[in-house]
Amino acid sequence: MLYDIIGESESAWIPELKLDLAEGLLYLPDKRWAATQIFESVKAWLKLRGLLVPEGNKEILDALDAALTIDDLEYVKKLNECLVAVGKTRQFSVIKSCYKRAIGRCKQENSAAAIVDFNQVLQLNANFAKANFNRGLA
């Protein structure tokens, strides 16, 4: 398969390419083909980051949500558009993901990692008062 060949040298492209394929498949009457490629894209995204790929679509999306960073804005935008097009209601927000992860890291007393996540939130929304306040507490 083409993805296997590309994956050997340009694995960072695979999640995007699979979303591109999903976009092309959206024109077919059966949206399941596109939905399959969306989830294959997310699996590739998780693997690229060295993360465990869980079983089940909800769990796969939860794993993605827990790992999003500011570097994923374009991917998330395209992913959200594809999810809507196949009739899925779940949408992702890098700000919410980073904030939620930062709060969790504060609870685990991992201040340095929490500050990194709060900084990402504030880069995207400098007026997010709770993030600024909690970063100060971290």
Image (spheres, helix red, strand yellow):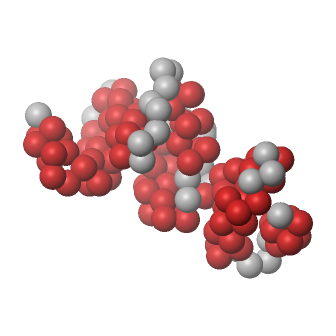
Q: Is residue 27 left or right of residue 124?
A: left
- Residue 113 % position (x, y): 67, 59
Foreground residue, 25 or 100?
Answer: 100
Residue at horizontal 74%, vertical 54%? 110
Can residue 101 be spotted in the picture?
yes
Residue at horizontal 48%, vertical 65%? 71
Foreground residue, 35 or 108?
Answer: 108
Is residue 10 placed above or below 126 in the rendered structure? above
* Residue that extends furthest to the bottom in the rendered view of this protein: 126
Q: Quadrant of residue 127?
A: bottom right
Is residue 33 placed above or below 18 in the rendered structure? above
Q: Is residue 11 left or right of residue 124?
A: left
Can residue 31 be spotted in the picture?
no
- Residue 19 % position (x, y): 33, 47
Q: How many marks?
A: 0
Residue at horizontal 26%, vertical 54%? 13
- Which quarter of the figure is the N terminus placed in? top left
- Residue 115 % position (x, y): 72, 66
- Which quarter of the figure is the C terminus placed in? bottom right
Q: Quadrant of residue 5?
A: top left
Q: Is residue 126 left or right of residue 57?
A: right
Q: Is residue 80 left or right of residue 12?
A: right
Is residue 126 placed above or below 75 in the rendered structure? below
* Residue that extends furthest to the top in the rendered view of this protein: 55
Residue at horizontal 29%, vertical 54%? 12
- Residue 27 % position (x, y): 29, 41
Q: Quadrant of residue 35?
A: top left
